[in-house]
Amino acid sequence: MALRDSDPAEAGGYRIEDRLGSGGMGVVYLARSASGRRLAVKVVHGQYADDDEFRARFRREVAAARQVSGAFTAPVVDADADAPRPWMATLYIPGADLGRHIRDHGPLPLPRLRELAAGLAEAIRDIHRAGVVHRDLKPANVMLADDGPRVIDFGISRATEFAASDVLTQTGRVMGTPPFMSPEQFSAPQDVGPAADIFSLGAVVAFAASGRGPFDSPSPYETAIRVVEGDPELDDVPDELLPFVRLCLEKEPKSRPTADELLRLLRNGDWPAPGPADDTPTVVDAGKLRRPRRKRLWLAAAAGALALAAAATTTVALTGDDPAPGNLPAGWKEWREQAKDPSLDKDPIGAGAPFNRCVAADGTSLVCAGDEILATRFALADGRNTWSLPIDGTADDVGSSSSSGGGTIIGTRDGRVYAYGADDRAVGGDDGSTATRYTVQSLDAGTGKVIWKTVTGDGEEAAEPSSDQGASVAVPEGVITLYGKRGDQFALLDADDGTVRWKQKVPRSNEQICLLRSAARQAYLVCQKWNADGAVGDTRITQLDPATGRARWTIDVAGDKDIVGQADGRLIVLGTTGTHRTLTLINAASHVLTTVRLSEAQPEGSTPTVLRGRLYFTLASGGVRAVDPQSGRQLWASDSGVEQAGPPTASATRLYLSSISGRLAVLDLATGAVEATLGGRDDSGTVDFPDMVAPPVLVGDALYVAYGIRSAYTVDVRTL
């Protein structure tokens, strides 16, 4: 690959001879040392040089690569993470990467496939012995050297001892390459361990045997669903290596062998049958099938890095129930309560997660949803839990097909709340398969009475109509939701009776991901096209006419973008991956586009929220940054002390943030100064894998905070 005029003549004192390749983060050059040794020098793009978080990632990549330098990797020769443009030099490995080799020459024959499987198992063994998890093993990161495969690129690796405390990996972004990622990288990325590399190893070997990944699908979203739930396609894998690949591709991490065990099995050929993680035999009662509880897919819960919304905050559309400021609800007192379990099953799964959303309605009710609860009411005044409805309203012991934590409040209108149900039923034989009937429902906030209930999809491919997943929005006319047995339409359900007023096809649903968004009570369709290799194309934003569902206007913006909110009549649009350096403003009336440069770059993984005309970025570490979206100027930066906070809530003078433990921070809206804090609570159980934290709800001077397992408490903000 020829050098360009913009390429440097040297990097770190090493003379550059050729360009080997480039990616989103940097360029890799062929260089020579003073002694004539050929090196591969990775130089990061200049745009990342001032990004402290990126430098921290790069330092970690260098450290990981140094730790695992050996016979099965590319040894690190030199590096400088503090250079004006950070760089790292490794020994150059001649040859093509596995992906290019398969494209050029087709699948590997069995003898070379055996060598690849053994060589990669040895490489992964050494990487894990060094205390590192690679997390992005894929064909492009496997070099076919003369003496065996070499594993390269430790850009998103992680030391095993860091686990969930690693802030750099807790950014809300799904990290990896979808066709070769493990199920846990989607469902609980903060808990990814060595077993994830074993899963990727199996996928890579299957690719080398067939020329395609075992979970390949038309879009990254569909690929992710197949990785987590589907069976791999292994028809072209030779019988001799089928046990190897199947064991690697076990869904449960504990069911996969270690690299050492794989090597022993390769030598001995004594393959165990894949099965459950423990030794307990599985007995399936066809009369009482039960679907196991699943952790929420990150790509769905946040609308996913793969499905556009890794960085954006989904907001509940309030259509008529905004509380007036001042005073407390009549009869108010401090309370904390946990919702009753409304499950109709004889053997219910039980509570285990927090609420996803809570809203105030009808002047007397706090209505919450999440953790398999369709909706439940607490009295604003005293916390009495007067009614509760399960997301699965059938007593069939199948459970809900919505992911663990399923359920949310889509919106409110005139004393009613919109929520969704997911009724499962067993289908097929003894394999535990289920199909789901999804409904959107309008409920009386005070009594829980169902005003109307409309089926939006019924079948194994129907879309879960969750606003948290970009599959529904509330507007003054009712609810716009994904619709149909495959979720390839969207429709308006009338606010008064739930009647389907119109339906439209989701554009090119096999080529792109489309999400429903709302801002200032107006609905939008945000579609992001993915290329065949999983790279992001442009994003198309369409304002929908609520009378017909047709486009009022459409505008294309470069890269992966999503709507965060609206201020001063202009939509605020941000990138969903990478450091935030600019934002895009779109006039909602004239759809004129303006690009605004941020005075301070905002870290990748920070969560943006628009409140009272300002843009706030919250960080997993507790940091909060306020930005004027019209000018891009950072107004203040503060440390709230609340780690892993959910989206904030604002009054006219204060910003409120809370965490899954119920810890609360109160910040001055003008300066960011921390005015008050409340400690966390331990009276509602421990949540192992919190998917999201509901924003606090402010009703006059009463603040309501969701926390723990299906719990909430209230406090008079005047006492803080």
Image: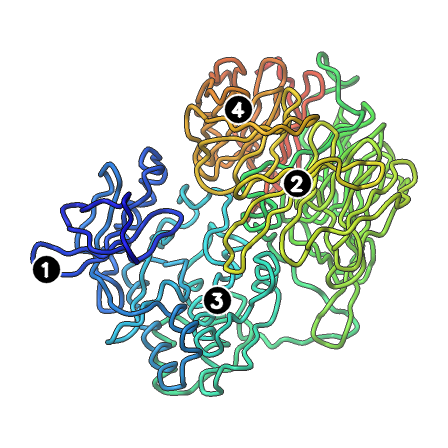
Q: Quadrant of residue 473?
A: top right
For the point 33% across and 42% down, the residue is 45
Q: Name the secondary structure under disc 2.
A: loop
Q: Earlier in the sequence, mark 1 or mark 2?
A: 1
Q: Nearer the viewer, residue 315 or 270?
A: 315
- Amino acid residing under circle 3: Lys
**Is disc 1 placed on a helix, strand or loop?**
loop
Pointer 2: residues within 10 angstroms few (<14), some, or many (20+)?
Answer: many
Gap in angstroms between the C-alphas marked 3 and 4: 38 Å
Q: Which residue is mark 4?
A: 665
Circle 3 Cα neighbour tier, 10 Å, few/some/many (<14 / 14–19 / ≥20):
few
Q: Using the image, tell me which numbered label, if any, was put on residue 36.
A: 1
- Whether residue 698 sits left or right of residue 573 in the image: it is right
How far apart are the alpha carbons under marks 2 and 4? 19 Å
Between 419 and 270, which is closer to the camera in this rendering?
A: 419
The amino acid sitting under disc 1 is Gly
Camera-side mark, 2 or 4: 2
Q: Which mark is residue 356?
A: 2
Q: Amino acid at mark 4?
A: Ala
Please tell me whether residue 308 is drawn above or below residue 260 in the rendered image: above
* Eye-nearest disc, 1 or 4: 1
Q: Which residue is mark 3?
A: 254
